[in-house]
Image: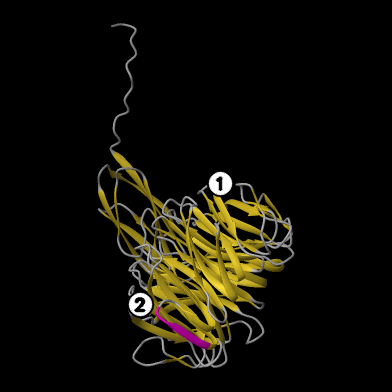
Amino acid sequence: MSGQCVPYTEPPRTTFTLTVAVGGSGTGTVTSTPAGLACATGTCTFKFDAGTQVSLGAAPSSGMFLGWSEGCSGAGGCAVTMDRDRTIAALFGTPGEALWSFQLGGGQNDGALAVAVDSRSDVYAAGRFQGSFMVGTTPLNSMGSADVFVAKLSGVDGSPIWIKTFGSPGFDTAVAIAVDSSDNLYLAGSFSGAIDFGGGTRTPIGSPDLFVVKLDPQGQHVWSNSFGGPNIDAASGISVGSGTVAVSGSFSSSMTISGQTLTSTGTGGYVALFSTAGVFARVKAFTGSGTCIPRGVAIDGAGNVVVGGIFNGTIDLGNGAATATSYDVFVSKLSATGSYLFGRTFGGSSNDAGGEVSTDAMDNILITGTFSGSVNFGGASPVNTNVSNLAVIKYSPAGSYRWAQAFGGTTSQLTATRSSSNPAGDVVVTGYFCGSVAFGSVTMSSVQACPVDVDMFAVKLAAADGTAVTGTRAGGSSSDASYGVAQASNGHYFMAGNFTGFADFGGQARTSAGGEDAVIVALAPL
């Protein structure tokens, strides 16, 4: 019939473009099967017929192939189906080299204390800042002596996606961060005055109290909660999994959460559980005759909760009282319903520190600490940690001893702050050190000798036995420290910490604006 409009239907595409970007400090060539693409530098493109199965291979000519990003991940093969235009990036260089760094700070002391990665390999970092300064076009102005910041950065180049700040007239800080499978963000820390995270004003009972906040991937408030007692309370860790959020920390004398009051003769510990919708579930206290301070918490794949920390005096984790005349380390595992599964305590001849915990993809438990002398971690024989050296211990999901490794040197100081495992079970440990340290065959030295200043480090340990595979250090002539580490699906690692004065992050020079500045550093796969 004349005058009718016939809808236009675009014919199906017969070809799609594959774009490959080659970068890094090393060199190499990426080639395709079927043939057509050979890229040795910069960005290359080639059109393949729709539906073609394309395999990419990477051959280094200097340095080594570190892995794929964008459309593929890892350092193995890369195979894609050309059902749409696709982009793949290939990185050649040195394991653990710095890819980019992001600095945040003004004329006072600022620090990034936690870092996490989402499903898109973008980076979340959180900590505290003081004073007023600009980050790009975003002004940051603290309301009190220190305020909370949380930033989302591009995993590709570190450019800010968004930055949020929260503050009171007092001292406020974020200390732990976690991301769920939907890329929502969970934040834990402490606050000392009236503060609004987006859900209304919260006022501390004492000073400081604890907060837990959930933000969506755009940084918008979802829910927030706070709890505490009349004295000093602190958060130390946060983890999310199986629909549950777990927060660990310590309290003085007493603390109330959702109507439940915990008491302790001195400093006690806690792990509080919420649903991911913000509904309080339960709280477990860790108390004894002395001091108990949890340092970290992890939820494994079955929803069980692992807590680690330090204690002195007596403590009963559920398997009878343990006693320590000086500070020892503990690890406890609770079921998803809060029942006791296992507990361990261990220590050397004097004060030990640490107790940070993490779990790997197989639900094995990793715990780090600084120990002195000969320590029995549960193996056939004690491990000699010399004087205040770092130890990393691995237990099975049931609490059976797997391995322990001690690292350090007789004239060095070495502190681990966080750890993160890759899908294969290899673990990366981060922290700070001074002097010359040996992680097995991996050695590194700080710019200044002990005890002048410290540098940050990251070291990768093999899943099978904890042997050091490779490592890296960063920093300058003043103190620099890493307090968090996280791994993206493409194998890149991210450290969060602070630095003072001039520092070199893999050839990227940074100078702090005043005292300590916050820094997030992206590392090539270790």
What colouring style does the render use? secondary structure
Q: x and y percent of residue 125 in the render?
A: 56, 60
Quadrant location of residue 267? bottom right
Relative to 281, is 231 on the left or the right? right
> What span is colored magenta in the figure?
319-324
276 in the magenta segment: no
Q: Residues within 10 Å of mark 2 (few under 14, many from 20)?
A: some
Residue marked by disc 2:
399
Q: Is residue 100 visible?
A: no
Quadrant location of residue 422? bottom left
Residue marked by disc 1:
220
Judging depth in this view, the residue of 504 and 283 nearest the camera is 283
- Establish if 329 lies above or below 230: below
Q: Residues within 10 Å of mark 1 (few under 14, many from 20)?
A: some
Instruction: Tell me the quadrant of the picture where the C terminus can be found.
Output: bottom left
- Single out the mark in the foreground, 2 or 1: 2
SS state under label 1: loop
The three-letter code of the residue at mark 1 reads: Gln
- Establish if 425 lies above or below 106: below
Relative to 334, is 128 on the left or the right? right
Extreme-top residue of the structure: 2
Q: What residue is rendered at 32% in x and 75% in y?
A: 398
Measure the alpha-carbon separation of dots 2 and 1: 39 Å
Relative to 320, is 224 on the left or the right? right
Instruction: Tell me the quadrant of the picture where the N terminus can be found.
Output: top left
Q: x and y percent of residue 102 in the render?
A: 59, 61
